Amino acid sequence: EVQLVESGGGLVQPGGSLRLSCAVSGFTFSRNWMSWVRQAPGKGLEWVANIKQDGGETYYVDSVKGRFTISRDNAKNSLFLQMYSLRAEDTAVYYCATLAARQTYDYWGQGTLVTVSS
Amino acid sequence: QSVLTQPPSVSAAPGQKVTISCSGSSSNIGKNYVSWYQQFPGTAPKLLIYDNVKRPSGIPDRFSASKSGTSATLGITGLQTGDEADYYCGTWDSSLSAGVFGGGTKLTVL
C-alpha cells in the first residue's frame, strides 16, 4: 500500500522558516518524480514544486522561487520542502504527492498545516 | 486567479448527470494532458481521471472525462449524495513551466 506521511507543519512568524518532510512507503521512491501542492484555508489547490527522481531537476511556482527549496533523500525514502522568508499568504495545508507522467498526482499524503502569523 | 477556469459550483438531483468544465489555453490544456481530482472536506485530494480520459482502478465508470482543444470536461452520471465534493482539473503549463489547477467546483447533489 502506498503511503505518504507529511510532518513539520506548525505556527511560524512572518519571515521565519520551516522544513516539511514527507515519509513514503509502498513504492519505489527513487523511481518517482515528486511534488508539493498546497491549499490555503477555504481555497483551491496550488502546485508548489516538482523534483525529479535524482533531485537534479526542480520546478517552482513563481511565488515561492528563491524562498522554498524542494529536495529528497532516496536512501531514506523522504521528500522535503525547506521554506524561508515565510509570508502570511504561505499559510496552507501542504500535501506531498507522487507525480506520475504528464503532471498526474496519483497518490497524496494527508497534509500538514503551516500557519504564518504573528 | 487560477490559470484554469472552472465553474464555482454545479448541482443536480440524485440519479441525474452533471458536467464540470475546465477552460485553459494553448500553453496548458491545449498542449498537455488533463487530470481530475475529487476532494471531500478535510481530506486530501484523490485522483479521479488522468491522461484526459483514463480512470485509475477503483474509480467507477460513472465518472468520465473528455478534452477538446483548450477545454476539458468531467462528467458524472447516476449522481449519488456521496459524490458531493470539490472537483479540480489540473495540467502542466508549458509557457509557465509550472503545474496549474482550476479553482475547483463544488458539486451539490440536491
Image (cartoon, rainbow, N blue to C red):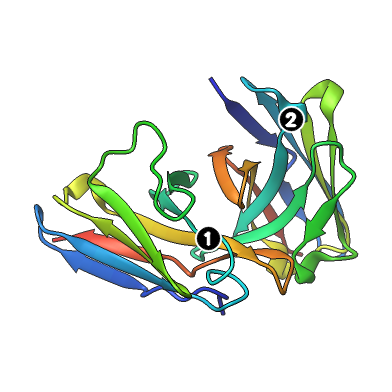
Q: Amino acid at mark 1?
A: Gly
Would residue B87 be found to the left or right of residue A113 on screen? left
Q: Residue at x 39, y 52 (%)?
A: B53
Quarter of the C terminus of chain B within the rendering = bottom left
Instruction: Point out the image quarter for the N terminus of chain B.
Output: bottom right
- Cα separation between marks 2 and 1: 22 Å
| Rendering coords of residue A67 (x, y %) | 88, 62
Question: Residue at (47%, 48%) from the top-left corner?
Answer: B50
Q: Say if B60 sits above or below A75 in the image.
A: below
- Quadrant in the picture for residue B31: bottom right
Pointers 2 and 1 within a single chain = no
Residue under numbered circle 2: A31
Please state the chain letter of the residue tagged with numbered disc 2 in the rendered image: A
The x and y percentages for residue B58 are 34, 32
In the rendering, at what x and y percent does residue B47 appear? 46, 44
What number of labels is visible?
2
Q: Is residue B25 left or right of residue A90?
A: left
| x, y percent for residue A66 | 90, 65
For marks 2 and 1, give the one nearer the viewer.
2
Q: Amino acid at mark 2?
A: Arg
> Pointer 1: residues within 10 angstroms few (<14), some, or many (20+)?
many
The chain under label 1 reads: B
Q: Where is mark 1, residue-wise? A: B90
Q: Secondary structure at mark 2?
A: helix
Relative to the observer, which residue lies in front, A47 or A100? A100
At horizontal 88% and vertical 58% (from top left) the residue drawn is: A84
* Dot label at residue A98: none
Does residue B104 show up?
yes
Q: Where A42 falls versus B84 (above or below)?
A: below
- Could you say which is closer to the camera, residue A38 or residue B37? B37
